[in-house]
Amino acid sequence: MGASTSPVVHMLPAVLFSMAALWVALPLRWLTGLRCYYAAASKEGEAAARGGGRKVVKPRGRSARGGAAPSDDYDLGGAESLVVVPLSLPVAAQLTYRGALENLVFVSLLALCSLAFGLATERLLGWPASAMPPLLAFGLGFTSLFVLAQVDLLSPTTSPTNKALAVVWGVLGLSAALALHVLQPGGGRLLAWDLKRAAAAVGPLLNAAVKAAAEKATKKSLEASGAHVPTVVMPDSALQIALALAAAALAVLLFAPAQRFVRSYFLHMRPPEWGLDYVAPGALASAGLTLHLVLPLLSSLLWVRPMFQELFDLPDGVLVLVQAAALLTTAAAMAANLRPLLQRYLDRGLTGWYQLKHGSRAARGNKDDKRNLGELIRVHCQATNFLLGKAAVQALAPAALYLAFGLMLLHSALQPVEAGTLAAEAQALVESCVGFLAFWTGACWFSYSAGLLLPATMLPRSVALAACACLLLAASGRLPAAADARRGLLVDGGGPGCDTCRRVTGDGVRVRTDPCTDATVLGLLFKGDKVKHTCTTFFSSCGHDWAEVEHKGRTAYVADEFLKAC
């Protein structure tokens, strides 16, 4: 099977499977059976009652087990009771933002199936690797952000106050991301991404792309024609600003989904006493929603080197594989919680009805006000059901975003490349950029969720989770010293007696990402080559002493016995 046909071959089964899923209305069937609430006298409620819907007359007052009606409770006519209706497929087909939901599911299945089929054919049939799986995963990430913007920032159903608040969070996110890049905590070694190397890789990759496009257009080699492709150089600051802008977009678009999640999480964990017959939290669903809250934070901590990589002494290749697995696990947990989250969202129709019915004594004491209150209840139930499609997109888009990040990292981890090649630099660029964005996504999600839960009655649990995160971050300041002590770190001090120039004394000397023989090889040095020593040496690590050097704009390590002063 030729390499030129491999993209088509990789795409065809994925496209067919995804189209089949849409043909059988898989996204809508995912929602069928959810309980919807309608006022009994409304058009929907009367139709549901004729179709077998269950009428619910809730106990009045604060007791869920009956008792006398309080003196402030008056009959509201058709809004006195609700009809509980399972969501049917025809009704689901009329949901607002149905197209956004189906697009999100389609692109998710397309990216997932493309990578699975590509890996299967490469491993079992020996077919060449295709660039389509990571491109489709990138498209999935873009689609996730686009549909979130469509249902939130660009939607007339979102209040101007919420839009303004999201923009404020975006500005704060931009500032925080720029500060993170500029300050570089831990001297750039604390976080597991290398933006210097990533920025250095952009220029060669753009040059190669321009050259390939020009040769394809002219159908002849540029070297043979004597043409020259200008060298593109991207400064570190340009990539940092680009990633900071992406971080700001994530901060803006993740606020509304986190807000929606917190409301459903709170109702699930603290259901009203009168509604336990309908809003009954199951142990499995409670555990799933708690994982939904903490897994993004835990996955982000994998990019803090002292808290995982140095603690378990993992090489870079294994670390990327673990990070990809964590992101995919987070995506699976979020997708599995779609129905519980949406059911709690729909249960707001029930809780809103109860609060309106029992919340205003004066409104029910006046005949005209009572009629208006009944109409308000009917509108509230209709609006809750009408926006179910928006809530579904908000619940599923973060899962799709994590799926995109996980698929890109998984493809990178499972595609071995030769060190020092253009493919290795492209891989480093993807891992650094995706790593930063995945870390930022988890930090935003947990910060929003914990911050919104703090003022509520769930304060103890939020404080416990925040305390655990603070303890882990505090421990990260001690772990580097422990890891360095195991490896025997000696810092020369960089004073006047420190000679930073080193000359290579052997041929084919390997440059590695970490001071150990099982670390990833970044390239080779030959006799006479000069490197810049950082005046830091690791003694007795994996059987060698290792000099810390600068190699192609990043920190690397070379066995010290192959270096001498210039």
Image: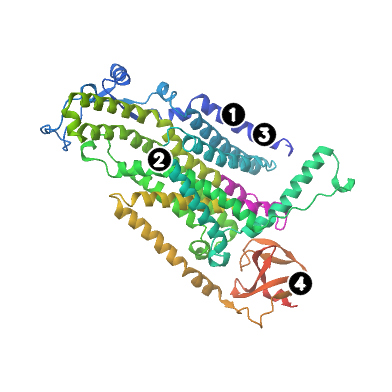
Residue pointed to by mark 1: 16
Badge 3 crowding class, 10 Å Cα cut-off, few under 14, some 14 to 19, many 20 or more, is some
Contact (CB < 8 A) between labels 3 and 4?
no
* Residue ranking furthest to the right: 225
Disc 4 and disc 1 in contact, CB within 8 angstroms: no
Q: Quadrant of the C terminus?
A: bottom right
Q: CA distance from mark 1 to mark 2?
A: 27 Å
Q: Residue at x 57, y 54 (%)?
A: 320
Q: Quadrant of residue 264?
A: top left
- Provide the secondary structure element on which disc 2 rests: loop
- Classify mark 2: residues with Cα within 10 Å, few (<14), some (14-19) or many (20+): some
Of mark 3 and mark 4, the one earlier in the sequence is 3
Q: Residues within 10 Å of mark 1 (few under 14, many from 20)?
A: few
Residue 391 placed where, x, y %? 41, 35
Residue in view at x 35 percent, y 31 percent: 384
The amino acid type found where label 2 is placed reads Asn
**Rendered-image quadrant of the N terminus:** top right
Label number found at residue 337: 2
Where residue 398 appears, x then y in whole percent?
Answer: 48, 42
Between marks 3 and 2, how big is the CA–CA gap? 33 Å
Q: Which residue is mark 3?
A: 9
